[in-house]
Image: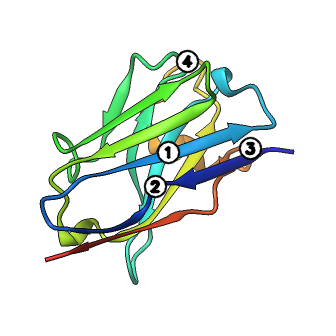
Amino acid sequence: QVQLMESGGGSVQAGGSLRLSCAASGYTYGSRCMGWFRQLPRKEREGVATISVGGGGKYYADSVRGRFTISRDNAKNTLYLQMNSLKPEDTAIYYCAAARPDSDNWCGDFKRYESNEAYWGQGTQVTVSS
């Protein structure tokens, strides 16, 4: 049974930091792109960051580039999101997801996670107060 479990969410003041983790099980972790998404209040879910199978390719939404860092530990089947310089507009439910890379083994397209073969976690709440 595939399972993605996020942790590390919470409440923080603007300018603070949080580190999210996502523990994966039930599939071959090292064969899939991994990504972080978020759903802001009253908005659609959006891509935050995605990382290649081996971890060398990292792609970010413009809104978080330079503040957030995605990483993965394939030995521990765990995905991370280090979030620094948090802003109130980062308040959202954060989800991790796994998707197959494209035919060139590229993971830079958030749309890859729209496939019905993608896996999703249940989400963790991040609240940033001003």
Choose the circle earlier in sequence order: 2 or 3. Answer: 2
Q: Residues within 10 Å of mark 4 (few under 14, many from 20)?
A: few
User: Which residue position holds label 4?
Assistant: 105
Q: Residue shown at 37%/73% (left/top)?
A: 40
How far is mark 2 from mark 1, CA to CA?
Answer: 6 Å
What residue type is disc 3 on? Answer: Glu
Q: Which structural element holds mark 3? A: loop
Task: Check disc 1 and report the residue beneath it.
Answer: 21
- The residue type indicated by label 2 comes to Gly
Q: Is residue 17 left or right of residue 116?
A: left
User: Which SS class for mark 4?
Assistant: loop
3D distance between C-alphas at marks 2 and 4: 29 Å
Marks 2 & 4, CB-CB < 8 Å contact: no
Dot 3 or dot 1, earlier in sequence: 1
Residue at mark 2? 8
Are the residues tagged 4 and 1 within 8 Å (C-beta)?
Answer: no
State the residue at coordinates (80%, 44%): 2
Secondary element at image label 1: strand
Marks 3 and 4 sit apart, C-alpha to C-alpha, by: 16 Å
Three-letter amino acid code at the position of disc 1: Ser
Q: Earlier in the sequence, mark 2 or mark 1?
A: 2
Q: Of label 3 and label 4, which has the lower sequence position?
A: 4
Return the x and y of residue 114 as percentages of the image width and height: 60, 51
Q: Residue furthest right?
A: 1
Contact? badges 3 and 1 (CB < 8 Å): no
* Residue sticking out furthest to the bottom: 42
